Structure formats: structure tokens, C-alpha cells
Amino acid sequence: MGNFLDLILEPLKELFLRFKAFVPNLLAMLVILIVGIVIARVIRLLLVKFLTAIKFDSWSDRMGFTKLMRKGDMWAKPSVILGEIVFWMLIIVTLMTGLNALQITAIDQLVGQFFSYIPRLFSAAMIMVIGYLISGFISRTVLITAANSGFHYAKLLAKAVNTLLIVLILAMVMEQLQIAPSIVLAAFSIVFGGIVIALAISFGVGGINAAKRMIENEAVTKREDAAKDEIEHI
Amino acid sequence: MSDFYQTGIITTLHQLGKSSLERLESELLRFSKTKPVALVLPALYSEFEGPAMPGIIQELTKVKYLNEIVLALDQASEQELQRVRELMATIPTEVRIIHNNGKRITEVYETLARNGLDVGQPGKGRSAWLAYGYVLARGRSDVIALHDCDIVTYNRELLARLCYPVANPYLDFVFCKGYYSRVSNKMNGRVTRLLVTPLVRSIQQLVGQHKFLAFLDSFRYPLAGEFCMTTDLARVNRIPWDWGLEVGSLAEVHRNYSPRRVCQVDIAATYEHKHQALSPDDAGKGLKKMAVDICKSIFRTLASEGVVFSDGLFKSLLVTYLRQAEDTLLKYEADAMINGLDFDRHEEAKAVETFTNAIGLAAQIFMENPMSTPLIPNWNRVISAIPDIFEMLRIAVEEDNK
């Protein structure tokens, strides 16, 4: 009978001991979560105030980031949205740190993978922001130059350049994030190569007559120059 | 039927002979192929609940030459916006509603404010200005017509006559102001009759001939809310956001274009809309507020053109105005008598008294701060500050209309 009771109580005792060992971890996780959420809120508040003070919203309006957000139907201030992004990133980091405190092997691996992915996320974000700024700058330069040169399709050309650059930047971002890198590379090569070939063919075929005229003019000029040399100058 | 006399330095297009709406509309339809016309309607939700807006909608359902209608809706909740959408859906022309109280348009206003562009308080001026911006952002129309949404006696001939001078490519007008008689059983339009015209003539008496005063005096109804203009003009014009809207807009037209390209057109035999109370004791509302804003706008415009205002000039102006207004009042009394109209001389005299106070108050405000009423910047200025503002505005309106 004693053995039978031991058979029942032993697992329960084991469970209790494990639970007793687990409780501090659980409490640590809860504390980390609560402190993390509070810190994230404070950081969000300070960040928004700081961004407002340095006129980040006006800068975003002029740089085109606000337009980008509006296209995605986001109508809060850019500083508020950036504050929200930082807040949720901190919440994710807090959650991961909290889960890590549980000291469960499977979760530990997941957390390790997450933290090793953060630098990639950061660099992808940097590529996107800087790339967007550069693409905007280049497309505006193209627009102004083409318009000043009297090119009729200046706006279209600037838009095309902008689109090509955005495609390039997105491919770089995807590559950085390691999202199906081989497919991204292949798709990018096909799209970009296709565009270049299409441009080459259209300019080549469309410019045959122009090129012919130029070569002929060149040849005529040379002949005229040669003929002139035969004349004896006084 | 009116006479054909041309007054002032702008062209006056009269209503002569029997009107032919069919001819006007068929020609406008032809013109609209090369010069598409947008109609801007600054409206309050309350106007949809009254008799005016349902009547206007009914008339607009028969108009075929309009390219787009932009309704700048103020003081409306989300449910009320939905109701307005349903009412406007009967119009065959493409209608876009700018929901001024919606979160997206509010954010557009905030974007302007944080970039140092003061677009003033909510009201007709600000709504109309944003609607012009939206028409410019879409780039689908070359002509913008605007009329109030409280016209009880609205018919589509008003719109056709208003659009015709600017939409007609053979006439080289860039701006056209509507005029009409404000007569029911009595003469209405007190601010024009008893303030603007006598004030303009009094200033002329004191400072001599001035191009802007001659321009303003050429309009038969300078405070009419109905006008039509080219989109180029909408791009360069700055407008006041207060009651000085009409006079301020005319000042900008005068500044940017030759009077040869400006006209006024007789758009209605009768015109009835909501009336403002005189409010003689409160300069913050009613006709007194309107009078103060209009006077400030005139003073500011003249000052910007080099007229020097001093205490002495303002003191003389008050007396000169009073004499002018009293003389004008007698003229209107005679006009009312011969036409069998009611004429309450005491009420008219009270209005003159109120307007005299308003001129004094406007003069005081002007002397304290001549820049007290900033104009809403023109769209070229706005684009230079926020290059993507048109795109943002377009997205906001498109999303609101989904």
C-alpha cells in the first residue's frame, strides 16, 4: 500500500519540486515584462518629445517619408509612428528576454536566433531609409535636368528612374533579411536585366535612323573637308 | 432685364434678351473638352438638412459639362458624411468629398501647421482653399467655379453663366465674379450697399484715385460668393480665411492680373440665401464681425499698395463714410419707393451706425498691427515648403471617398 502511495505521490512531489524551481524563473519573466513595458513606454514618450523638439515631422514631410506613410493609410504624425515602432520593438525584445529567463532550452534557441537576427533587421532598415532618400534625390535630379534640357517626358523618366531604384533597394533589403535570397536574386536579375534589354532594344531599334543620319553626316563632313584641302589656298 | 452699360475698369456681362440655357450648356459641353471645369462647393452639413442643398443637388444632376465636383464639407461627423455621400450619389458627375473634420484631412492641416504654413481658422475660406488644392493635385481641370451652398433660389443657369466667360477659350478671362440683385420684398445685401461701396468711395475721396479702389468699385456685387477662375489663378492667389475672403480674393486678382482679363456676369434675376444678424453690440459675430474683417482687408490691401494710413486719415474717413452712407441710403430709399419695396429706414440707419463702429474698430486693429490678418499662402508657396503635399491631399481625399 505504501509503495502504491509512493507511486502516486512521487511524481506529484517531483512536479512540485520542478514547479518550485520554475517559480523564480516565472517571477523573473513577469518582472522583466513589467519593467520592460514601463521602460518601453517611457522611451516612447521621451523619443516622441525629442523627435518633436528636433522637428522630425517637418523633416519627414520634406523628405517624403510622410507621403510614404500616407500611401499606406497611416495618418498619425511620423514621430508618433516612429515612437510606436520603437515601442513595439522594445516590447518584442522584452518578451524575448523574459522568455529567456524561463530557461527552457527550446525557447533559449529561439531567443538566440532572434537576437542574432536583430543586426540584419537594423541594417535592412538603414538600407531602406538611406536608399529611399537617395532614390528621391536622384529622381528629382533627373527630373530637373531632363526638364531643363527640354525633354518632353521628364516626369515619366524621373518616375521610371525612381521605380528602378526602389526595386533595387527592395532587393537589397530582402537579401539583407535573408528572405528567400536565391529567389530574390533570380527575380531581381530577371526584372532588372529585362528592363535593361528592353531599353537597349527600344533605343537600338528606335535610333537606327538617327544613328544612320549621324554617321552619314559625319562621312559627308569628312568628304567636304577632304575636298576643301584640294583647293589651293591663296 | 438690365441695361447694357459698362461700369468701371472690368468687363460686365449683362443678362440681355431672353436667356437660352440650352445654348449655353451645349457650348459649355464643347468648351469643356479643351477646358475641363471643376465645381467647388464649400458646404456645412446643416445646409444638407435645409432646403438649399437638396435643391442644388437636384439641379446639378442635370448638368453635363462639369468634369468634377469637389465638395468641401465642414462640421460633419462620420455618419453625416455617409448621409452626404448618399445624397451626392445622384449626381452623374464625379463627386469627391473633402471631409474637413475627418482624421486624414485634419492631419493634412496639421502637416501644414507644423511646417510654418498658417491656414487660419475653419471656415469657407480655408475649405475653398483646400478644395482648390485638391483640384490642382488631381490636375484634371483647367477651370474652377465656386458657389455657396445656401442658395435657396438656385438653378443651373446660374452655374452656366458663371462658368461661361472663363471656360470659353475665345474669351480671354481668367476670373469672373457673379452678380445679382438681392431683392425680395425689400433690398438685402446691406454690407455691399451700405458698407463696401460707400467706404470705397470715401477712401477715394480722401486719398484720390487709386487703381485697386477703382477695381473694387467696378464690381456690382463685390461680396458675391460666386466666381469662376482658371486653375493658374487658383495656384498663385492667396486668400484670407476670415470674412475678408471675397475682398481679399479680389485684391489678389487685381495684384496678379490685368483688369482686362477680369469680368463680372449677371447670374441670377433673384437670389436668396441665409441672412446674418446685424449684431450691433458684438464685434465678434454677425454683420459687424463681417464688416470689421472686410475693412481690415481693404486697409491692408491699400497699405500694401503704398497708401499711408494715419489717425487723422481714419478720423476723416469715419466722417466721410457716414456722409457717403447717408447719401447712399437716400438713393436706395428712392429706389425702393419706385419699385414698391419695403424700406425700413430706421433699420438701414442702424446698419450704417454699426458699420461706422466697425470701421473705427478695424482702423484701431489695423493701427495696432497692420499684419493682423494673415492670408493663406498660395499653393506654389505651400509646394515649395512641402513638395509632397498634393500627393498627401490626394491620398487623403481618395481614402475618405472609398
Image (spheres, coloured by chain):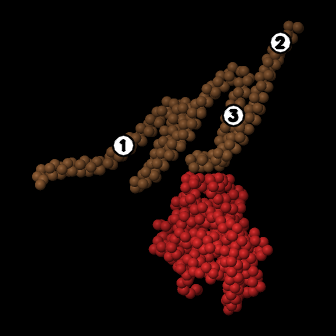
Chain colours: A brown, B red
- The subunit letter for the residue under badge 2 reads A
Residue A153 image position (x, y, % from top left): 42, 53
Provide the secondary structure element on which disc 2 rests.
Answer: helix
Q: Are marks 3 and 2 on the same chain?
A: yes
Q: Which residue is mark 2?
A: A10
Q: CA distance from mark 1 to mark 3?
A: 49 Å
What is the count of numbered marks? 3
Provide the secondary structure element on which disc 3 rests.
Answer: helix
Q: Which residue is mark 3?
A: A90
Q: Earlier in the sequence, mark 3 or mark 2?
A: 2
Task: Left or right? Give the position of B65 relative to A83.
Answer: left
- The subunit letter for the residue under badge 1 reads A
Residue A192 image-quadrant placement: top left
Residue B346 image position (x, y, % from top left): 77, 85
Q: Nearer the viewer, residue A2 or A111?
A: A111
Residue B208 image position (x, y, % from top left): 59, 81
Which residue is located at x 75 percent, y 80 percent?
Answer: B353
- Which three-letter amino acid code belongs to the residue tagged 3? Leu
- Which three-letter amino acid code belongs to the residue tagged 2? Glu
Task: Left or right? Give the position of A222 relative to B304.
Answer: left
Vertical order, A159 against B249 (above or below): above
User: Residue A200, which numbered label?
Assistant: 1
Residue B201 image position (x, y, % from top left): 63, 82
